[in-house]
Image: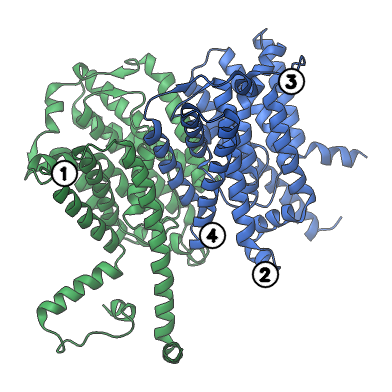
Chain colours: A blue, B green
Amino acid sequence: MLDRVFRLAGRWEVVLLELIVVTLIAGSILSPFFMNVDNLLSQTRDSMIIGFLALGLVPVVIMGEIDLSGEAILGVCAVSFGLLHESGVDAWLAAVSIVILGALFGALNGTLVIAFGLPSLVVTLATLISVRGLAYVLVEDRPIVGFPEAFVAIGNGTVGSTPIPQSLIAFTFAAIPLWCTLRLSVFGRWIYAIGSNSSAARLSGVPLSLVRLIVFIFSGVMAGCAAIILAAHYDSVRADAAQGAVLSVLTVVLLGGISIFGGSGGVGGAILSMVLVGLIQNGMRLANISAEPQALVIGGLLIFSVVIPRVFYSFHDRHQAKNAFFPS
Amino acid sequence: MSNLRILSDGVAPSPEACPAATRRLSSFALMLRDTREGGIITALAIIVLVFSLSTDNFWSADSVWSILNASAIAIAVAAGMTAVVLARQIDLSIGATLGIAAYAVGALLDYGYHPLVALVVSIAVGAFLGGINGVIVAWLKVPAIIATLGTATIYRGLLFIAAPYFLGFLINASQIPTQFRALSRIPVLGVPFMTVIAGIAATAIGLIIAYTPWGRNLYALGSNPDAARFAGIRADRTIFSALTLVGATAGLGGFLYVMRYASVGVRAGVGFDFEVISSVVIGGVAIFGGAGRVFGAVLGVIVLNTLSRGFVLMSIPEFWKVVATGAAIIAAVTVDVIVARRRVERIRLSRRPHALMEREVE
């Protein structure tokens, strides 16, 4: 029994939960506005953009690849949405088209990785640079504002008279299928298999290229969804939308216990760490800390999120190794 | 030379079969095809050709001067970055390091210190910050991309926090001595002084990488980290020193930054990481390590700045340059992969002559 409690307490998700509780307590001591329901809900709305990008990145990192280009794809999708809206296209139709646009950019990443065997780090670094450039080419420095009210509600409205934000519902509708796919489907197991050992996966008949392509397309689709949320939330789009978000997104994913080397972690951890990072950012905003020192804290978290599990598991492994040699 | 012979389909042109001029030309063509810098030289030639045909004043002395002037900072840092990329690492924090070093230089000059003191301090600051990256990557075993993305924000955040205690968020031109500002405009044989400094640094680093055991270790680690470790190469020390080196060059870059712009904001060097990494990759340094030269990386810098200059002359918006840069990276890496595959194939065939015959039968 005690053994099971310890094992549960050692799980990364539980550690994250504890950290969330600590942050909540610390935040409510430091500021009376922190535990306010309105504050927490507005923070939830802010987190959704990062949340969608992180959801897209989760399967990519589990697969042992990386996608840095999410924020840039978001940028170009958001800008295209603005342009479509300006030219009189219906907002909902425009929303669907930018999700397709996101999928196309994801497919571009995937194709370059698969067809030429290029490292995803370089491909997505290049698309991060050039796709963001494309967003600037499309609208330069001009903001596009004034979307229909019903559309803006996605980013700011609530469901009926309840305080639940609409964007949270949208996020749930994306997160649950992803969770199911990763945990319950063969396809999800393939993703883990590729991340653990891609040659072994190939030899055991996993359609490597197909899985990779679909996962990169999914990442692009999520970036497109994040663009919808962003456009609705701010009721305006600009070429620099979510520029620099790659830091928060990577932090959320890696802090969520998803190994950068692939093959482990899941959606649950990523969502918990999204909550944690959101709370920390919210607390810092309430404390009037400006953007760059805030980024400093997130950057520190990013490094720690890689170092801590390593230290954690190296003790764990050493313990196990000792037991293997000297069975008690 | 024996290498080249294997690479040219196993058939060396016999010396007496062709006249000297053709031979020289064909050996130049072979060089373009078989060295890693061939692609970038060809690209530079095409770019220059296109711009000189499509604009009137591309060949003015002013143009060359401005390209060299704009390239200086990136040349210095790209040389250091080559060492890092060769060892299969990457550094995304050089922009922030450059910002801190540049701020330090600006502050020291304002306090009345000699520029040489500022130079030494800037390099030391850069090396120190690079060393922190090195410790995190080499001994804490955090992948370089994660570690340096994190430290980039940490360094930048620290600069924002510290700046109000020194000279505020912006050190402007009136706080920098005029003699120092004039330095950058001194021509040395038609080359801006700051480009000369950067060139000396890049040459030194290029020679170190090419001719010292340390440089060989970088190539070994980049080609096959496991094999390098079994051969007794201390991976952690080598990676640590490479990251320290790129930090030091970013420090030098900070010094040159003040020389060029004569003012430093806390945002100095934002986006500079991508510029340098793009140049290095476009210049034929394999992003997964083990191949490439400082010479290529420097050419990469010059190509990007030539492109930039040409776009200005043709009044194409600056944003297009960013798109072109990304596309160039993908093109460079793709060509690299394809060429490497062919090379392996060719070597395989040349070692098994009957395989060559089989292919001919097919």
Provide the chain ID for the residue under circle 4. A
Provide the chain ID for the residue under circle 3. A
Marks 2 and 1, how far apart in space? 54 Å
The quarter of the picture where residue B332 lies is: bottom left
* Amino acid beneath label 1: Val
The quarter of the picture where residue B130 lies is: top left
Identify the secondary structure beneath mark 3.
Answer: loop
Marks 4 and 3, how far apart in space? 42 Å
Instruction: Locate the N terminus of chain B by quadrant.
Output: bottom left
Check chain identity for marks 2 and 3: say if they share one.
yes
Residue designated by label 2: A203
* Residue lying at 26% horizontally and 57% vertically, measured from the top left: B43
* Amino acid beneath label 4: Ile
Disc nearest the viewer among 4 and 3: 3
Residue designated by label 3: A159
Disc nearest the viewer among 1 and 4: 4
Provide the chain ID for the residue under circle 1. B
Residue designated by label 1: B196
Q: Earlier in the sequence, mark 4 or mark 3?
A: 4
Disc nearest the viewer among 2 and 3: 3
* Mark 3 surroundings: few (<14), some (14-19) or many (≥20) residues within 10 A: some
Outermost residue toward the right?
A1
Tag 2 and tag 4, C-beta contact below 8 Å: no
Tag 1 and tag 4, C-beta contact below 8 Å: no
Residue designated by label 4: A114
* Residue lying at 10% horizontally and 80% vertically, measured from the top left: B20
Identify the secondary structure beneath mark 4.
Answer: helix
Q: Position of residue B345 (x, y in %)?
A: 43, 77
